[in-house]
């Protein structure tokens, strides 16, 4: 596509919300109207939210519907197509929103997760309010949740035919932290109902926003040794040296291990953290939040929660900021044969891809067709009609839209994220270390669902948190053949708050926080000189 008209602008949803409260109501009302419209379309309409939301993961299709070696949805995670696949996904959903009568000018807003409001209060209220006044009628807020118009049946049994973890009955409504949405079996339904009864509407919202705010900007209690926050991670990813490292966690893990003094991050990591903050599990161990299983915390169901698209719109905005800052508006480069460049490198191949297929900028981004139609169900002979990364590199000249100026970016184009480079240059001075603690070989097969790795340093008998690393995973990894060949999470934690002398006498503790109270493993490790004689359940290394 070539630019033929004035660029359309995606604005912050908070900006629309503030305009609404000042009396300029139409922009937010039209967004609500468009979302209400696509959610009310028949489930088999290619513009319906059910069909669009289902492209990401569930309902499973292709070989992933029945073969655990394949990923069930079309989405790309843990590989170099993560940013571009989701860019086109948002573009197609936006087209559907614009197809609703009276909504031709609607653009998908972004949730600016690092703006002043989100850092202080959490999610903008228009994404969480129960009701909204539209055309004189009080309606259910279409941005808050989604009710399944038909049942979804999980055909991957996760190693046990009586445990279809992600099945959802007709009428199921998506949930967010601190609630659980596991309803695949009668036992799941009973446990979920009992657990969810602990939270009334007010406490649900309080816990949700508190968890989001904690992830976004909780730097800990010691100002001399601050924790890395999601706000920091977004800034740090803007300094990634190339697209391959920037694009995904798999490629970054290799780069980071080979360059232990690295101070950058991949875009996919703060993306993962926000998913966990909205869906669970809980970052802290405070009762009663022990079994949060919100839909945003699982890739299989995340795309069925409307907030997913406002979150990913911000992720795409950060992608565009990185492109502008680093001179990649019109071209991207993939390092050949690098981890994260094959279809099986992380979650497993998606529909249309074979095992270990090489990924490139010319790889089809199924199921999105360039002629304005969705390719559903997938057909091999239609591959030439499908978008590729090469078709969506420059959002302004190829897709005819841009983003308003939000956080991480100044109006004149000087990026706040670049300031992190000056901070990184001072690392290692005054005796502080420039090394990292690497955590590898975690057996995901022993952990149900997504989880959080909490790392601690123990000095003079005092245990202090180093940081948190979230991992998006399946409910039962043992039922995922591809997952069993990719158990290495490769989390890392900066040690720049500590001197080399302190590290000589340090030990480390690793804690796994999963979606179930019993999903907790603690291992106190080794001194920086080497491992203890007893083989640990994880491999820890200071580099």
Image (tube, grey):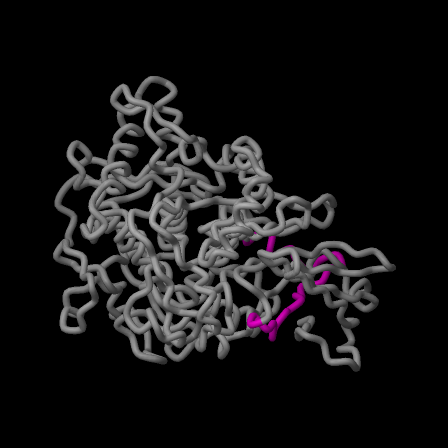
* Residue 160 spot, x, y in % from top left: 48, 72
Q: Quadrant of residue 105?
A: top left
Q: Nearer the viewer, residue 253 or 305?
A: 305
Numbered marks: total = 0
* Residue 17 spot, x, y in % from top left: 38, 28
* Residue 471 spot, x, y in % from top left: 53, 61
Q: From where the camera sits, is residue 23 visible?
A: yes
**Image position of 164 (left or right of 371):** right
Q: From where the camera sits, is residue 238 visible?
A: no
* Residue 493 spot, x, y in % from top left: 64, 61
Q: Nearer the viewer, residue 13 or 321?
A: 13
- Rendered position, 360 above or below 243: below
Residues in magenta? 421-445
Tell me, yes or no, whether the highlighted magenta stretch contains residue 441: yes
- Rendered position, 66 above or below 226: below
Q: Nearer the viewer, residue 197 or 68?
A: 197
Q: Residue at x 64, y 69 (%)?
A: 438
Q: Quadrant of residue 129?
A: top left
Q: Residue at x 30, y 41 (%)?
A: 108
State the quadrant of the C terminus: bottom right
Q: Residue at x 57, y 59 (%)?
A: 451
């Amino acid at each position: 596509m070539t630019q033929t008209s004035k660029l359309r602008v995606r604005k912050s949803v908070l900006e629309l919300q503030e305009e609404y409260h000042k009396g300029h109501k139409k922009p937010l009302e039209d967004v609500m109207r468009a979302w209400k419209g696509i959610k009310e379309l028949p489930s088999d309409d290619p513009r319906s939210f059910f069909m669009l939301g289902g492209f990401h993961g569930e309902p499973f299709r292709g070989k992933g519907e029945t073969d655990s070696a394949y990923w069930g949805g079309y989405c790309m995670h843990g590989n170099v197509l993560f940013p571009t696949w989701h860019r086109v996904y948002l573009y197609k959903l936006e087209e559907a929103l614009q197809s609703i009568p009276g909504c031709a000018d609607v653009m998908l807003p972004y949730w600016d997760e690092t703006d002043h409001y989100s850092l202080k209060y959490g999610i903008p209220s228009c994404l969480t309010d129960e009701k909204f006044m539209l055309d004189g009628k009080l309606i259910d807020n279409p941005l808050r949740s989604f009710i399944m118009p038909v049942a979804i049946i999980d055909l991957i049994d996760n190693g046990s035919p009586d445990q279809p973890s992600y099945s959802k009955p007709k009428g199921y409504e998506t949930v967010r932290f601190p609630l659980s949405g596991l309803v695949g079996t009668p036992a799941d339904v009973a446990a979920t109902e009992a657990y969810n009864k602990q939270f009334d509407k007010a406490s649900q919202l309080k816990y949700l926003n508190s968890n989001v705010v904690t992830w976004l900007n909780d730097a800990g209690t010691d100002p001399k040794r601050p924790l890395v926050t999601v706000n920091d991670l977004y800034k740090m990813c803007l300094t990634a040296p190339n697209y391959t490292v920037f694009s995904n966690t798999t490629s970054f893990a290799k780069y980071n291990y080979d360059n232990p003094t690295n101070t950058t991050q991949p875009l996919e990591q703060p993306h993962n953290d926000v998913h966990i903050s909205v869906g669970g599990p809980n970052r802290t161990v405070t009762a009663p939040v022990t079994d949060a299983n919100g839909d945003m915390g699982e890739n299989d169901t995340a795309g069925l929660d409307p907030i997913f698209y406002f979150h990913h719109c911000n992720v795409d905005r950060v992608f565009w900021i990185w492109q502008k800052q680093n001179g990649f508006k019109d071209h991207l480069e993939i390092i050949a044969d690098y981890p994260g460049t094959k279809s099986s490198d992380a979650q497993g191949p998606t529909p249309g891809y074979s095992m270990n297929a090489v990924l490139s900028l010319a790889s089809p981004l199924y199921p999105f067709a360039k002629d304005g139609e969705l390719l559903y169900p997938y057909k091999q002979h239609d591959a030439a009609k499908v978008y590729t990364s090469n078709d969506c590199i420059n959002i302004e000249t190829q897709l005819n839209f841009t983003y308003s100026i939000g956080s991480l970016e100044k109006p004149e184009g000087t990026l706040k994220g670049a300031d992190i480079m000056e901070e990184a240059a001072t690392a290692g001075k005054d005796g502080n270390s420039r090394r990292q603690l690497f955590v590898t070989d975690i057996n995901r097969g022993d952990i149900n669902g997504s989880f959080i790795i909490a790392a601690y340093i123990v000095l003079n008998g005092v245990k202090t948190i180093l940081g948190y690393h979230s991992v998006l995973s399946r409910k039962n990894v043992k039922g995922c053949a591809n997952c069993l060949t990719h158990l290495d999470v490769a989390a890392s934690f900066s040690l720049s708050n500590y001197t080399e002398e302190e590290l000589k006498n340090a030990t480390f503790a690793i804690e796994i926080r999963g979606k179930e109270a019993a999903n907790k493993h603690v291992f106190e490790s080794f001194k920086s000189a080497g491992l203890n004689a007893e083989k640990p359940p994880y491999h820890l290394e200071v580099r």
